[in-house]
C-alpha cells in the first residue's frame, strides 16, 4: 500500500443473505467501525438497499452490485442510476466477473454501465481479471489491458478520479485460492503503468487498485503490504462481520506498517 492513496475495502454480498441476516450484518459491521483511514463500502442485494441504507453507520458507503445504463424507462427488471441515487447509493460495481462470465456481459456493456455510473455522480468500482486458462496461457496482463481499455473508453481523466479498479482473477474468486502477494503486485503494477500511459502519471499514481479473490483476514495483510495493492473487494469472508472488520484493520495496518 502506498500511503498517498486511501485504501478502499468493499464487501460484495453477491446474491446472499435475507433481510434479517443483512440487517444483522450491517449492524455488526457498524458496531465495529472506527474512524478514518479507510474507505469502506458494502454492496447488498438490490431489494435490501433502502433498509440497509437506513441502518448504515460508521461512515460506511452504500454500494450497488449493478446498474442499467439508461435512464428510467421500459427496461423490465433493471435498476437505474436515478433509483440508486434515491436509495442513497454512493458506489456501483461494474464488470464483476460473475456478470461477465455467468450472465454474459460484454466489455462494451461494462463500458456503458461504467459511464452511466460516472455521469450520475457515483463512484464506479470497475472489476477486471483473467480466467484460469488465460492465466495459464500467460495472458493475464493482456486480458486486464483489454478490459481496462474497453471499460474506460470515453472516460475523461477528471471522471477517472471516481473510479476504483478491482483486479479479481476469476480463478481466485470463491475458490479459496488466492493470488500470491507477488502475483497480485505484478498485475497491479502493470495495471497502474497502463493507466499512467492512457491518462497521465498523476492519474495512474492516484488510482486505487484493489484485489479480490478469496481475501480473508489471514492473507489480507500480506496482500495489502504490496506497494500497488490499495485494498480489497471481498465476497465470502465479508459475510462475517468479524472477518470483514479484520480485513479493514489489515488495510489500516498497512498504512502504518
Ligand atoms: P470471494 O472473496 O468470495 O472470493 O469473492 C471475491 C469477489 O468476487 C468479490 O467481488
Image: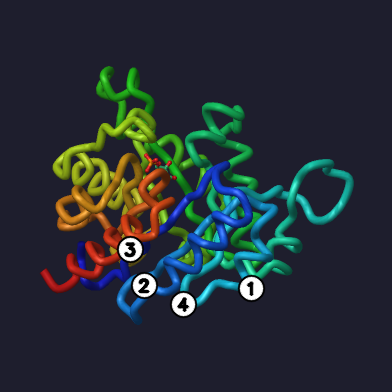
Q: Decide: marks 3, 2 in contact (CB < 8 A)?
A: yes
Distance of label 3 from label 1 (alpha carbons) = 20 Å
Distance of label 4 from label 1 (alpha carbons) = 13 Å
Viewer-nearest residue: 20 or 47: 20
Task: Check the image and name the residue furthest to the bottom.
Answer: 35
- Sequence order check, earlier mark of 3 and 1: 1
Q: Is residue 64 above or below residue 213?
A: below
- Sequence order check, earlier mark of 2 and 4: 2
For mark 4, does the 10 Å Cα neighbourhood hold few (<14), some (14 to 19), or many (20 or more) residues? Answer: some
- Sequence order check, earlier mark of 4 and 3: 4
- Sequence order check, earlier mark of 1 and 2: 2
Distance of label 3 from label 2 (alpha carbons) = 7 Å
Observer-side mark, 2 or 4, equals: 2
Viewer-nearest residue: 249 or 141: 249
User: Mark 1: which secondary structure?
Assistant: helix
Residue 166 image offset from top left, x and y in percent = 39, 49
Ligand 1, by image quadrant, is top left
User: Mark 4: which secondary structure?
Assistant: loop
For mark 3, does the 10 Å Cα neighbourhood hold few (<14), some (14 to 19), or many (20 or more) residues? Answer: many
Amino acid at each position: 500500500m502506498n500511503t498517498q492513496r486511501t485504501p478502499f475495502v468493499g464487501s460484495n454480498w453477491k446474491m446472499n443473505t435475507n433481510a434479517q441476516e443483512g440487517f444483522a450484518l450491517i449492524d455488526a459491521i457498524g458496531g465495529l467501525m472506527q474512524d478514518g483511514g479507510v474507505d469502506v463500502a458494502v454492496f447488498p442485494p438490490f431489494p435490501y438497499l433502502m433498509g440497509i441504507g437506513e441502518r448504515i453507520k460508521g461512515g460506511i458507503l452504500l454500494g450497488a452490485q449493478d446498474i442499467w445504463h439508461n435512464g428510467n424507462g421500459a427496461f423490465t427488471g433493471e435498476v437505474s442510476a436515478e433509483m440508486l441515487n434515491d436509495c442513497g447509493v454512493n458506489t456501483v460495481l461494474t464488470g464483476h466477473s460473475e456478470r461477465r462470465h455467468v450472465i454474459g456481459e460484454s466489455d462494451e456493456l461494462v463500458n456503458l454501465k461504467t459511464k452511466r455510473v460516472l455521469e450520475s455522480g457515483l463512484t464506479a468500482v470497475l472489476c477486471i481479471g483473467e480466467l484460469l486458462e488465460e492465466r495459464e496461457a500467460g495472458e493475464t496482463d493482456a486480458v486486464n489491458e483489454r478490459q481496462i481499455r474497453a471499460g474506460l473508453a470515453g472516460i475523461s481523466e477528471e471522471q477517472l478520479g471516481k473510479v476504483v479498479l478491482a483486479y479479481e482473477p476469476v480463478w481466485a474468486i470463491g475458490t479459496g485460492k488466492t493470488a500470491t502477494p507477488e502475483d497480485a503486485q505484478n498485475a497491479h503494477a502493470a495495471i497502474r503503468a497502463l493507466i499512467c500511459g492512457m491518462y497521465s502519471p498523476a492519474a495512474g499514481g492516484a488510482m486505487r487498485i484493489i484485489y479480490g479473490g478469496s481475501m480473508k483476514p489471514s492473507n489480507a495483510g500480506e496482500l495489502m503490504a504490496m506497494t500497488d495493492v490499495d485494498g480489497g473487494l471481498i465476497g465470502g469472508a465479508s459475510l462475517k462481520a468479524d472477518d470483514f472488520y479484520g480485513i479493514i484493520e489489515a488495510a489500516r495496518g498497512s498504512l502504518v506498517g
